[in-house]
Amino acid sequence: MEKLIYQIALTQIKGIGSITAKTLLAHVGDIEDIFKQTRAQLLKIPQIGEYLVGQLTKERDEAFRRAEREMEFIVKKKITPLFFTDEKYPYRLKECDDAPIIVFTRGNQDFNAGRFVSIVGTRKLTDYGRGLCQQLVADLAQKNITIVSGLAYGADICAHKAALDAGLNTVGVLGHGLDRIYPALHRSTAVKMLSQGALLTEYLSETNPDAPNFLQRNRIVAGLADAVVVIESAKKGGSLSTATLANDYNRDVFAFAGRVGDEFSAGCNTLIKENKAALIESAEDLEKMMGWEISPKGKNAIEPALFTDLSEEEKKVLLLTKDGMHINQIALKMELPISRIAPMLIEMEFKGVIKPLPGSMYRAI
């Protein structure tokens, strides 16, 4: 618990964002030691100048007071904090340089199990868009995919409700603390998500749902997913920023096309036209492009003993990837560094027993 206070306190130092915090940790090695470094020691760290050293000194006491207050809230409300070095921190977010160093979550979601699809779109969803969203989620239920969105009006809440109706887990990424729900109209849906998914935020309690926060949270919506789907969007909007972030994170982006001239199809049509999103018309299209199509009957039963030229480690990887798995998760399960896993996967690909999928995923053949 004491370490958590230091972790929260670091986020409260002005000027120290997630990238700088990770730089500090990489050089110092321990979160507590960051606050114990001398001025001279801190100045030797790349990207740490006089200003940040001054901020660490000036704001240290207030940062710890705020962290201690947050600890009381976390314990009282049974919040689960996930620091980026924790095993349960979402491994997909670890791939994103600007991902928050700590997130707070309520619910029963395992962020490192299964496949995740983020669904975004306009807050002024049309009947056409609502139908697309509901059908997409209903069809994805066959794959037991977790649906991620932002609990906002329009496409977000439609995706969450459709997931709950289909029996899928769904994650709402918030632009404020876990002491409130915004918009309040979505509270009943948010409560249901606690037992069928989770609510997640990088913000402490008492944080208001201010506009800049929602732009910030879009990077989590993009980073949490294997694929991002844009349902409907005008030429400008938050969903387009999420699509851009997803492209930057090397996520696969998909969009439903709309009729030329329709206001809330213009953004999707532009994404497709500029090759920033692939055109889909159904969940089947998404599954095929992601390599998630259902294997022929009996093909999922893998017997490693048949592959006599595989090492013991390769046989373990083969079993792990029978339904597809991200390279980071393979490394985590195998308890091996990426530098060891990557060449092993290439070798297995040459042997014809595994194939790469979009988004750094691998699946046994």
Image (tube, grey):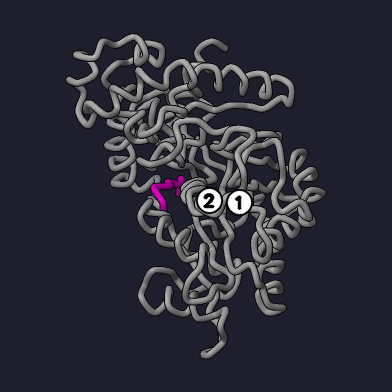
Q: Which quadrant of the figure contains the N terminus? A: top right
Q: Tell me if residue 99 comes above or below residue 121 in the rendering.
A: above
Q: Tell me if residue 84 comes above or below residue 215 in the rendering.
A: above
Q: Nearer the viewer, residue 324 or 141?
A: 141
Question: Residue shown at 34%/9% (left/top)?
Answer: 36
Q: Tell me if residue 130 comes above or below residue 170 in the rendering.
A: below
Does residue 270 appear anywhere in the picture?
yes
Q: Nearer the viewer, residue 290 or 260?
A: 260
* Residue 166 picture location, percent across and down: 76, 56
Q: Residue furthest front?
A: 58
Inspect the magenta stretch and tell me whether residue 154 lies in it: no
Per the image, the residue denoted by label 1 is: 148
Would you say the residues marked 2 and 1 are in contact, meaning their CB atoms lie under 8 Å apart? yes
* Residue 357 picture location, percent across and down: 41, 53
Which portion, as a residue range, is magenta? 358-365
Left or right, 44 with respect to 74, comes to left
Q: Residue furthest right?
A: 188
